[in-house]
Amino acid sequence: MTVDLQTRQQVGSAPGDLSLALTACLLLAVAATALGLPAVVRTPLALPGVLLAPGYAWLSLARWRTGQPARTPPALVLALVLSLALLPLVGVSVGAVGAPVSPVNVGIGLLVLTLPPTAWVLLVRPAHPGARVAVPPFPSWRQTARRLTPTVLSVGVFAAVVAWSASWQERPDSGPYAQLAYAGELADLTGPVDVRPEEPITLPLQLARSDGQPWSGLVTVAVDGRAQDAQTVRVAADDVVSLQATAPPEPGQHDATVNAVSDETGEELSLTLRLQVGEP
Amino acid sequence: MTLLQSRSPRAADPAPAPAPTAAPTGPVVLPVVAWLIAAAEVLVVAASYRVARDGGSPTLYYGVFWMGMLVMVAPFAAVLLSAGASARARTVAVVSFGVVTYVPKFLRNPYGPTYHDEPPHYRAVEDLLASRELYEQNPLIQIIGDFPGLHIVTATVTGLTGLPVWGAASVVLLMAHVAAVVAVLVLGRMLLPDPRAAGLGAVVYGLNPSYLYFDTQFSYESLAVCFFLWVLTLTVGAVRTTESPRALRLAGAVVLVLACITTHHLTTLVLIVLTGVVLATHTVVRRLDPAARGQWRPWALVLGAATVGFTLWVLTVADTTWSYLVPYAEKAFGSLSQHATGEESQRTLFAGSVQPLYERLLGMAAPLFLVAAFLAVLWRTRLLAGWSHRRTALGLTAVGGLYFASLPLLFTPEGYEGTRRSWAFTYVGVAVVVAAALALLLWRDPRRRWATGAVAVVLAAVMVGNTGAGPNDAYRFPGPYQLGSAPRSLTPEVIALAEEFGRRHPDARTVSDRYTNQALVAYGDAVSAQPGPGFRVWDLFFEAGPPDPYLVHELDTSDFAYLVVDERLSRYVPAEGTYFSREGEPTIRGDEPYDPDARQSQVPQEALDRFEAAPWATKVLATTNYSVYRLDFTSVGTPQCDQPGCEVAGP
C-alpha cells in the first residue's frame, strides 16, 4: 500500500478550498433567505452550508494541526454531526442574548463560528514550511467525473424511485366527507345569541366536500323544531349561503338548528345555535 | 486496547493504522449494481405498504416487505462480510446501509407527522418559526419545549432552505440516521484489531430494534442518539491518543455532549450512566495497572461535562424534567419488583400482534443468538482474563451487558416501554462484541467458506426478529383507518377539520380525545387539554348526565372554549386502549387482540347526543365524523364549584 505524503504546497489548500466553498454556501444561503429568494435557489446552498460548513471548518482546522486528512468519508460524517450539534448551541446562545431565534439569526451565528477556522486554514501557513501533511492525492476532475458519474447516476435513480414510491403512499382514510360550518361573526360566538322576540336572524353557512367539488343539497333551518327556511343550494367551498329565521316570541332559551342534506349521498350534517330571547 | 485478543497469534497482531490512500480507481460496477438493486427493492417495500394500506393479509405484506428489505440491504452487507473489500468500500457500504435503512420509515409517512411523538415536535418547529422564541410549552408533550435542539435544527434548515417543515425534518433525520452507524464503524475501527470487523459492528448496531422505525421518527431522541454515539466514539479516540489530538477529540466530544443536553433528557441521562460505567471500569483497573493511569481522564471529563451541563440545564431551563421522568422510572421499577414477587400479572410478548409467526419466533430468538455470540467472545478471546489492558473494551462490554439485563423488563407492563428505548444505547456494546465474534467466525480460517452464508442468514434473522420486537404493526405499516391508533387515525378529514378550525379559531383551547388532539395541535395550532386524574375530562364523554361542577369550574377558569368530538367514539374501542390519557383513565383494554367490535365502547351514545342538546354547547362546525362545539358554561348558569367532589344545586 503506497502512502502518498505531499507537502501542503504540493496538494494546494484543498481542505481550505472545500471549507471556503462550504462557508460561501452558508453565507449565500443566509443572504438568499434574508432577501426572500425562492427555495430552488436556497436549498442547494443551505443544505451543504448549514449541515457541513461549520463542522467541516473546525474539523479541517483540527486535522490541519494534526496532519490528518479531513476529506475521508468518516471525517465528512463527523463534520456533519458537529454541524448538527452546533446548530442547537448557536440557537440557544442567540436566544440567551435576547435576539429572536430565527433561521437567519441562527445562520449568522453559524457564520460567526465558521469564518475564523476557515480563514485560519486558508491564510495561516504551517509553522514549519517543510511540515508534511498526509493527504491523498487528488485525481484530475476528468478522472473523478469518469469514476463517479455511474455511481452518482445510480444513486440518483435510487432517490428518484424513493420519491416516486413516496408519491403513492397515502394517509389512512375513513372515506369521503363533507363539512358544514357557521361563517362570519357567528363563528366567533361565545354563548347564546341575544335576540329580541320575533327578530329576524341571518345564518351564514359554508359547505365543503372532501373532493373539492361544490356541495349540493337541501339546507334548512328550524327554531325549536319548527322549519323556517329551506333552500336547495349548490355552493363552492369558499362561498357563503345565508338562511333566514325569526326568533320566537317567547322569552327564554331556544334552539336554532341547521340541517344540510346532501343530494348525492343523503348524508345529513347539523349545527345548533342557542338563542336567548329577551323580554319584549 | 482492542477488544479482541484472540488466542491466535496471527489474529492478535494489531492491525496497522489506516493510512491515507490514493483515490481508488477500481471498477465502479458493484456500487452501481447495488444501488440499482436497492432502487428496485424500494418499489417492493412500497408495494408492501400499499398492500397493507388496502387491508391486505399481514402474511402477504410482511412477506413482501422482508423480501424487499433484505434484498435491499444485501449488496451492502455482502461488501462488509467479504474478506477483501477495501476500507473505503466498507465505509461507503456502511453509509449506504444507513441510507437504505431509512427508506422504510420515510415511505411510512412521507406526507407528514404520523407517529405519536411526531405531531408535538412538528408543532414545536412551527411554533419556533412563528414566534422565534425558545422553550414554549408544547400542548401535547409539555417537556419537549425545554429541549429544543431538534426544533432549532429543523427550523433553521426549514428557514434557510425554504423546504417545508416535514421535508427539512426528513433530511435531518436521514443525516442523523446515517451518522449513527458511521459512529459505530469508527468506534469499531478503534476497538477491534481487524478493521474489517468494524463494518460488521455498524451493521449489527443497525439491527437493533429501534434503528429501523423508532429512532427514525421525528422526535428529539432520534437526533440525540446520533450525538450519543459520536460522544462515545470521540472519547474512545481521545483515550487512544495524547496531547493535542486528545484535546481536539475531547473538545468535539464536549460540544456533542452540550448539544445532547439541549436535545433530549433521557439520552443525556443514559450518557451519564454509561460513561460512568466505562469510567468505573477504568478507575478500578488503573489501580492494578500503572500503565493505565491517565486513560480514565477523557471519560471523567465527558462524564463531568454531561453531569454539570445537564444539572445546570435542569436547574435553569428544564425544571420539569424530574417530575416528568421520575413517575416513569418509579412505575418501571415498581412493576419489576411486583413482577418478581408475583404480585403483578405478566405481560405477554407479541400479545394481540398480527405479525407472522416467523417474525415473532425470530423476535424471541434474536436475543438468544446475541447472548451466545456475546459469551463466545468473552470465552474465546479471554476478554475477562485480559481485562487489565482492555479497559474501554471491557467498559463497553458492560454497557452491552445492560441490554441483556434489561430483557426481563419486557415482561412487565410498565417497564416495557423504557426497556425498548434503552436498546438504542446499550446496543452499541452488543454491536462491538458481536462483531468480534462474527469476525472470528468469518475470517480467522479462510477454509470456512460456509461461514459467510451462515453469518448472512443469522444477521438477516436478527434483523427480522429485532424489527419485530420494535414498534407494532400499526407503526410499521400503513393500514385502514383505525380509531384510537395514533399512526392510523390522522385522516384527511381530521386534518382538514383541524386546518379549518385553526383558521377560524387560532390558538383556541380545546378538549378532545388524544387522537383528535394530535391533529388539532399539529395542524390547527390548538392548545389541547391534558387530561389526568386531577382533570377528568373523560367524564364528559363517559357519562351522559350533567357535567361534574368541579370539571366545569376547571374548564371554565382555564378558558377551554371548544369541544371537538369524534362521533365514532361510541362505536369503537380505541386500538391503543385509552381514549384520553394513560394517566388515570379507566383501562378498558389489555393485551387481548384488537377487535373493535369485540367489546363495547366506554363512551355511551347518549353522552355524545347530550352535546347536541346541552345549553352550554353550541355546535359551530360539523363534518361527517366530527363535531365542534363552542363551550360556554357561565352565561347559561351551569353549576360549578372549585372543590373536587362538591355538589351545587342546579340553576
Image: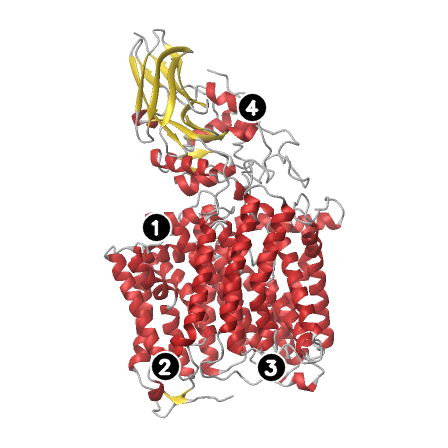
CA gap between label 3 and label 2 equals 47 Å
Vertical side of B583 occupied by B6: above or below: below
CA gap between label 3 and label 4 equals 72 Å
- SS at mark 4 in the image: helix
- List the residue tagged with mark 2: A140
Q: Nearer the viewer, mark 1 or mark 2?
A: 2
Q: Nearer the viewer, mark 3 or mark 4?
A: 4
Res A179 visible:
yes
The local crowd at label 2, few if under 14, some if 14 to 19, many if 20 or more residues have their Cα within 10 Å, is: few
- List the residue tagged with mark 3: B292
- SS at mark 2 in the image: loop
Q: Earlier in the sequence, mark 1 or mark 4?
A: 1
Give the number of the disc on residue B118.
none
The local crowd at label 4, few if under 14, some if 14 to 19, many if 20 or more residues have their Cα within 10 Å, is: some
- Pinpoint the chain carrying mark 1: B
The local crowd at label 1, few if under 14, some if 14 to 19, many if 20 or more residues have their Cα within 10 Å, is: many
- The amino acid type, in three-letter code, at marker 1 is Leu
The local crowd at label 3, few if under 14, some if 14 to 19, many if 20 or more residues have their Cα within 10 Å, is: some
- The amino acid type, in three-letter code, at marker 3 is Ala
Number of dots carrying numbers: 4
Residue at point 44%, 88% (across, down)? A4
Q: Do labels 3 and 2 touch, CB within 8 Å?
A: no
| Quadrant of the frame with the C terminus of chain A | top left
Do marks 1 and 2 share a chain?
no
- Pinpoint the chain carrying mark 2: A
- Pinpoint the chain carrying mark 3: B
Q: Position of residue B552 (x, y in %)?
A: 47, 27
Q: Earlier in the sequence, mark 3 or mark 1?
A: 1
- The amino acid type, in three-letter code, at marker 2 is Ser
Q: Position of residue A199 (x, y in %)?
A: 29, 11
